[in-house]
């Protein structure tokens, strides 16, 4: 919503957003943000690309398209996992991929303007960046995960610095929006999600996270007046339903396995 409302270009917004988030991470984690390995630096790059591509796509296409196309990331994760982790590609994953691809095709069928298509393509690339980040973080030790996020924000701020230097000073209202994007949306958003992950079931956290692509276009519609296309609504629902079914199935199988183990004791 604020990315749409702010009159600044994408890179100026990115400077404020990631710069403030980096400061918050430095305050909260202190010395823990130091000490990187090669994989951590690669993950920082993936994270930086994710943020940059998402903000640019949000400026160029509808908010609904930007967030929903980013949620195609599970397609690439599910395709890459068998190669990276020697995991068998199960039928439920194949069906999930098919559902996501179908939803993506429906969504893309609704936009024919050049601006929207450019934004849509960039949004798809943000989904690839998100998948790369998820896989990269999984391949690295847990202590490097926060460090990758911190330095990724620093990298984004450095990229956005020239644009910030050429921009005008924000008004009080614009400063509040920029502060919210950096401190609350990225900074506290990440901290609270990490805190919550340790206290709820994995299925709950995953399903709650799906509120983001649902509420994103709702807030933008309410405050900015941007209406998602019917194709975006239908395609987005197909994507989210495919992911929700997969999560529910995995949780069902996990509980079934735990019950069998308890009975066998």
Image (tube, rainbow, N blue to C red):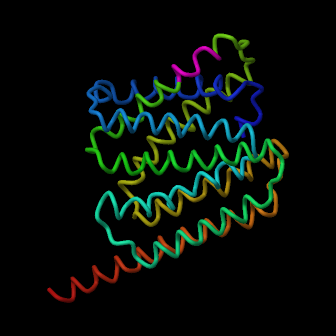
Whether 131 is drawn above or below 44: the answer is below
Location of residue 261 in the rendering, given as x and y in whole percent from the top left corner: 21, 83
Question: 202 left or right of 21?
Answer: left
- Which quarter of the figure is the C terminus placed in? bottom left
Task: Tell me the residue at 44%/63% (across/down).
Answer: 79
Residue 55 forms part of the magenta stretch: no
Q: Which residues are magenta?
A: 157-163
Count of labels in the image = 0
Task: Tell me the residue at 46%/59% (across/down).
Answer: 205
Question: 155 left or right of 108?
Answer: left
Task: Tell me the residue at 53%/68% (across/down).
Answer: 97
Query: Between 32 and 73, which is closer to the camera in this rendering?
Result: 73
Location of residue 207 in the rendering, given as x and y in whole percent from the top left corner: 52, 63
Judged from this view, the residue extending furthest toward the left is: 265
Query: Between 14 and 28, which is closer to the camera in this rendering?
Result: 14
Task: Tell me the residue at 68%/50% (across/down).
Answer: 216
Question: 237 left or right of 160?
Answer: right
Kindly report the secondary structure that dominates the magenta region of the rendered protein. Answer: helix
- Which quarter of the figure is the N terminus placed in? top right
Query: Between 86 and 151, which is closer to the camera in this rendering?
Result: 86
Quarter of the view holding residue 43: top left
Residue 159 forms part of the magenta stretch: yes
Query: Between 16 and 196, which is closer to the camera in this rendering?
Result: 16
Location of residue 72 in the rendering, given as x and y in whole percent from the top left corner: 57, 58
Whether 209 is drawn above or below 129: the answer is below
Location of residue 156 in the rendering, given as x and y in whole percent from the top left corner: 52, 27
Whether 245 is drawn above or below 152: the answer is below
């Amino acid at each position: 919503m604020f990315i749409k409302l702010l009159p600044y270009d994408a890179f100026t917004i990115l400077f404020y957003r990631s710069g403030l988030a980096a400061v918050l991470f430095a305050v909260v984690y202190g010395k823990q943000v130091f000490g990187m390995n090669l994989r951590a630096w690669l993950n920082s790059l993936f994270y930086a690309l994710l943020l940059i591509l998402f903000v640019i796509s949000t400026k160029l296409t509808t908010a609904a398209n930007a967030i929903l196309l980013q949620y195609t990331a599970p397609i690439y994760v599910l395709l890459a996992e068998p190669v990276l982790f020697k995991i068998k590609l199960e039928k439920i994953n194949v069906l999930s991929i098919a559902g996501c691809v179908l939803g993506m095709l429906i969504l893309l069928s609704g936009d024919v303007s050049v601006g929207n298509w450019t934004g849509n393509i960039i949004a798809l690339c943000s989904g690839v960046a998100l998948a790369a980040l998820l896989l990269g973080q999984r391949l690295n030790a847990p202590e490097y995960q926060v460090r990758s996020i911190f330095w990724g924000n620093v990298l984004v701020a450095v990229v956005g610095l020239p644009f910030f230097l050429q921009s005008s000073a924000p008004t009080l209202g614009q400063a509040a929006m920029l502060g919210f994007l950096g401190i609350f949306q990225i900074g506290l958003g990440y901290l609270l999600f990490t805190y919550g992950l340790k206290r709820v079931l994995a299925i709950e956290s995953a399903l709650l996270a799906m509120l983001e692509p649902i509420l994103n276009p709702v807030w933008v519609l309410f405050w900015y007046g941007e209406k998602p296309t019917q194709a975006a609504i239908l395609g987005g629902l197909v994507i989210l339903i495919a992911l929700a079914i997969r999560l529910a199935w995995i949780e069902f199988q996990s509980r079934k396995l735990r019950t069998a183990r308890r009975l066998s004791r």
